[in-house]
Amino acid sequence: MSGVRAQQKEKTRRLLIDAALKQLSAERSFSSLSLREVAKEAGLAPTSFYRHFSDMDELGLTLVDEAGLTLRQLMRQARQRIAKGGSVIQISVATFMELIESNGNVFRLLLRERSGTSAAFRAAVIREIRYFTMELCDYLQQANDLEGEVAYMQANAAVTIVFSAGSDALDIDDKAERDELSKQTIQQLRFIARGAAELSDRRKAVRKRK
Amino acid sequence: MSGVRAQQKEKTRRLLIDAALKQLSAERSFSSLSLREVAKEAGLAPTSFYRHFSDMDELGLTLVDEAGLTLRQLMRQARQRIAKGGSVIQISVATFMELIESNGNVFRLLLRERSGTSAAFRAAVIREIRYFTMELCDYLQQANDLEGEVAYMQANAAVTIVFSAGSDALDIDDKAERDELSKQTIQQLRFIARGAAELSDRRKAVRKRK
DNA sequence: TAAAATAGCGTACACGTGTACGCTTAAACT
DNA sequence: AGTTTAAGCGTACACGTGTACGCTATTTTA
């Protein structure tokens, strides 16, 4: 029951996952990766791939799950930083931009598969982003005392803006330019926050009047 | 000089373009299209493809250009509707959603290639979207009398939100759901407009004080 | 200790791909 | 009228793909 075998299996499974991750880049999408390439990069015979995944699709879904995990870790990290004080929006954007810089390919995977060719992939990515949005929604609702639907719309818009900025950031090498992008993104998030706060207040006022 | 020949050539060139466009769908991205498939759909021998495009990439860029054209026609259409009166935001969103419904695959092409694998494609799509954004920016600046940079940030955020909503709409069949999405999108655009107007006023106030 | 299970390998196959090459046929030019 | 140009076709090739099948070596189970 020690599981020498299971342990080894898990190890080469990771080898495959990492091989796939490693081959992702600006010029290489997951869907353009072949089973043989991934197996080769992992140092396996093509046919050995099947001992771990029945499909490239199955590997892909695993990758999306991992990417989602990375995203959630990011949020936790951001919350810790926020707890130490500072502008919520600014810290969030900075943290996100750091993710893009250090894990560009993971982020690219999510971006591409979100509008990709496989319904299963799309669904998986959308689910991960929804988690992300929902956590932000909860936070906004309690931190800023917003009306529920308004908080959701704000969270949704904010995530959209940040992901789009992240996507743009992937194509920018110059640090000064990226900083400028961050600044604009922060400003845009403030637009949204302001509009949301106002609508929430208005709705609450209407309720009281009754 | 009449050009019987050139005319015929243009005709089968269109055949190829339309064949490619026709094969695009939720399950089929341009990059997954093969030269042979496109040629076959157009009723040509594979090798005849080369008489018109040196590459699938060249065909792809042509497609992106066409998509951009469609987008610009859309804007003109929206402006005409706006001139007849009505909420600018609401009409814009409605027009956009109609585009998604009638030309889903063209829109999908833009979405996918924006974060796609080819730098040339990405650049081309980004250029088209920039045109779109810039026209909106000009409009906002003069219609709402906004400060320049603020107008740009609003236009940029608005386009991001609308494109994202369009992307979501592609996966929704139910009409009621799509209407709900439109409503939320409109609200989000109002958030942004509100925040932008405020910032613009504040900046102008600072200037006057000097 | 004997038997069963299984990770990994090598071989083999059918298939789809891009594209080089030479040919035909009809338009365009001289 | 004679010559050149060029669209379109068919054949052919080398290559990369997914995966079926049987084998080996080692762990796990009985």
Image (cartoon, coloured by chain):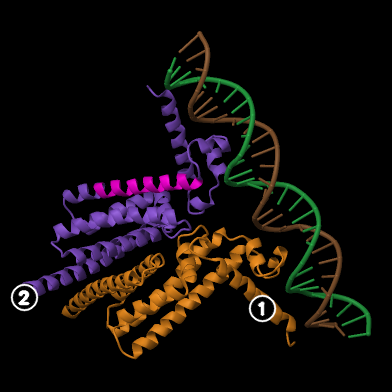
Chain colours: A orange, B purple, C green, D brown
Give the farthest residue toward the left.
B209
From the viewer's side, name the closer residue of A134 and A192: A192
Residue range of the region highlighted in magenta in the rendering = B56-76
Is residue B209 magenta-colored? no
Residue C4 location in percent, x, y? 84, 75
Q: How many marks?
A: 2
Residue at the image point whose x is 32% and y is 60% from the top: B162
Circles 1 and 2 on the same subunit = no
In the picture, the quarter occupied by the C terminus of chain B is bottom left
User: Of helix, strand and loop, which one carries label 2?
Assistant: helix
In the picture, the quarter occupied by the N terminus of chain B is top left
Number of residues whose C-alpha sits closer than 10 Å to that of mark 2, classed few (under 14), some (14–19) or many (20 or more): few
Residue B185 location in percent, x, y? 30, 63
Whether residue B145 sits left or right of residue A99 in the image: it is: left
Residue at the image point whose x is 56% and y is 66% from the top: A23
Q: Are marks 1 and 2 in contact (CB under 8 Å)?
A: no
Q: In this rendering, does residue A142 appear at all? A: yes
Residue B62 location in percent, x, y? 41, 44
Three-letter residue code for mark 1: Glu
**In this figure, which residue is indicated by the disc labeled 1?**
A10
Residue at the image point whose x is 68% and y is 69% from the top: A43
From the viewer's side, name the closer residue of A122 and B19: B19
User: Of helix, strand and loop, which one carries label 1?
Assistant: helix
Which label was assigned to residue B209? 2
Disc 1 sits on a residue from what chain?
Answer: A
Residue at the image point whose x is 74% and y is 80% from the top: A5
From the viewer's side, name the closer residue of A134 and A78: A78
Q: In this rendering, does residue A134 appear at all? A: no
